[in-house]
Each structure stands twice: as structure tokens, then as C-alpha cells.
Amino acid sequence: MIDQRLFKMEIRNFLIFAFPILIYSCNLQNKQDNEQIEKREFLQESNLVDVLKISNGTFTREIISNGKLKSIQKSDLQFKTSETIVEILVSNGSWVKAGQVIARIDKEDLEQQYNKALISLEKSELELQDFFLSHAQLLADTTSEEGKQKYRIAEIRSGYAEAKIALETAKRNIQSTELKAPFHGKVVNLNFKKHEQSKPGEVFCTIIDDSRFEVEFKVIESEISSVEVGKKVHIDVHANDVSLVGKITEINPIVDENGLFTVRATINNPGKLYDGINVSVLVENEIANQLIVPKTAVVLRQNQEVLFTYKSGIAFWTYVQTQYENSDSYAVIAHPDKNGSLSAGDTVIVNGNLNLAHESMVEIDEFLE
């Protein structure tokens, strides 16, 4: 009985001593084989995939920014005097020609002011003539500098100079009772009504030329070398799903406080664009001699970018780095720190790769061109 107790105690002590060693050995082995285990954790018996043979090509790099459309021409119209608005001939959205009358204000009082100014001018002319008659010898010479100065003094003393200015002002006031379009365009921001009082200095309406638009957008310092005047840009209008091609017209050669350059481009209006509308701007830049793959070819494994190459029915895990990106593709290289290999002529898996592991068995569903 005693020997049996001793035997059990020896077995228990052995297990207590040996178990930690066993656990440590297992952990060490797991650590050494970790990468292979990770690569095979998605392993399946068979997978249908689409493949593509990659080659060196020209990659179209895209710079994407946001902006707003601004009319090429814009003019705020306002009356110069405070009078009753008697006629409004347009409404918001009306298209007008250069010189077309937009609105009129009452000019009765202004015409009276003009008539008074005209009478004052006539009276001052009589005063000037009387001054000439009484100072004939003094004003005989009006060609020399001294004679011109004496003549000017006579105009001021007679009141003729002041009356002439008053008449010109009254004439301009009458002419300004009509607002006219300065160029072909569209009426916007018209908020006045007939019989209201015009307000000098307050905008009555605005005329915009919306046949062409300017779009202003920002580009970061590291990308400005890819932007130049005359380069084409693709502009997507958020509101109505319209895509247009424009041209860069201006680059402001200074960096703002956010490290951005201001760039302007122009586009023609096909009839569906409006001043102030939000747009996306896409600038394309071509980079030669790149390995290009669809975005679907690159997947994440343990937060690392990988793609799978295809060889004789087997998918091989390859770490990569994406050099450039556009809306549908990457320019890639084999990761320099992961001993990967990738070159032109390799066949890569572009679809059906989400659950693949290293050395998964695969079958080609489609060989893409």
C-alpha cells in the first residue's frame, strides 16, 4: 500500500515538472512555424479563380480633388439713385443679351433735376458772355497758358463750370434709370419687386455667363509636379452625374497655410451645370514601366498587402507594395523586405482570392486579357 502511494506521488511530481516544459516546447515550435501556419489558415481543397498575365505598362496615376463651379463672367447690377421701381422685364433664370433692359425706375424727379440743371447752365452761359464783354482785352488771348488760366477763372466766377458738371450728373442719373445687361448671360439673385424702392449700393440682380465655368481646386505639394497649364482634367458633377473634360488654365505659384496649391480649370457648359455646384476633379498623369494589376488582385493578410501568383494549379502567396493607385488599378512591386518575387509575365489571381492560402489548390475559371 505504501509503495503504491509513493508511486502516485512520483507520477504527480513528474507531471508538475514536465508540463511547463511541454507547453514551452509547443510554443517555441508554434513560433517557428507561425508564418507557414498563417499562410495555410485559409487552405481549401479547390478554388475557382480568374487569372491575368501581368506585363510592364504605362500606369495612369490619378490626382483627385474637390471644387466648385464658378461662372467665367459675373456682374452685379444696381441702381445709383433711390426711386420707385416701375418695371421689371426679367425673372431669375431669364437669359438676356448684352444691352438688354433688365428693369426701370421712375425718372420723373430726375428729369426735373435735369431741366433745372439745363436752365442753370444757360444762365451761367449768359453770365460768362457778360464777363467776356466787360473784360474783352483781358480775355483776348485764350491760347497761351496764362490766357487759358484766365478763361478758367471766368468760367468759375460765372458759375458755368459748376452748372456744366451738374447737367452731366443729371444726364447720367436719367440714363441710370435703366439697368442693362453688360453681356450675354443669365439673371440670378433677383429679389426686388415692382413698386419697391431702389436702394443705391444694393445689388438689384446679378448677370452670369454660364456658357463656360471655372473650377477651382487644391493640389498638395507632392503632386503639383504632375499638374501643368494646358493639361486635361476630368470633372464629375455630383448633382446630376455628368462627366466632362476641361483644361487647366492657371496655377497659383504659392503654397497656402495648409500646404496646398490653388489650381483653376475651365469647362464648357452642356446645359446641365450651375454656378456654385460641387464637383470632383481628376487629373491624370502617366508613369511608364510599371507592373499593373487590378485592385481585386491585392488582398490583406495580417495587415500586409499580398497577391497570389498562379503556377500549375497552385496559388503562391507573394508580399507586395503598391507604388501608385488609381480608381481601378495598382502599380505594384514585390516587397523588398519579404523575399518576394514578381515580374512581367507572371500569372496573378485577380478574382476568387479572398479565402486563399499559400499553396492552395486552384482551378482557372477565366483567363483575362
Image (cartoon, helix red, strand yellow):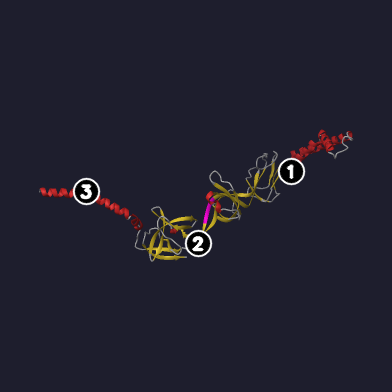
- How far apart are the two marked residues, 2 and 1, measured between alpha carbons? 67 Å
The answer to whether the residues at label 3 and label 1 have Cβ atoms under 8 Å apart is: no
Picture coordinates of residue 166 (x, y %)?
A: 77, 37
Please identify the residue farthest to the left as the structure is shown.
Answer: 1
Secondary element at image label 1? helix
Please rate how many residues cluster around mark 2, counting C-alpha atoms within 10 Å: few if below 14, some from 14 to 19, many from 20: some
Residue visible at 20% across and 50% down in the picture: 15
The answer to whether the residues at label 2 and label 1 have Cβ atoms under 8 Å apart is: no
Q: Please give the residue where the numbered disc 2 appears in the rendered image.
A: 57
**Viewer-nearest of discs 2 and 1:** 2
Picture coordinates of residue 277 (x, y %)?
A: 57, 49
- The segment highlighted magenta reads 61-65
Secondary element at image label 2? strand
**Viewer-nearest of discs 3 and 1:** 3
Q: Please give the residue where the numbered disc 3 appears in the rendered image.
A: 17
Please rate how many residues cluster around mark 1, counting C-alpha atoms within 10 Å: few if below 14, some from 14 to 19, many from 20: few
Indicate the amino acid at tag 3.
Phe
Indicate the amino acid at tag 2.
Gly
Residue visible at 62% across and 49% down in the picture: 71
Which of pointers 2 and 1 lies earlier in the amino acid sequence? 2
- How far apart are the two marked residues, 2 and 3, measured between alpha carbons? 63 Å
| Residue 165 is at least partly visible in this image | yes
The secondary structure making up most of the magenta span is: strand
Q: Is residue 265 magenta?
A: no
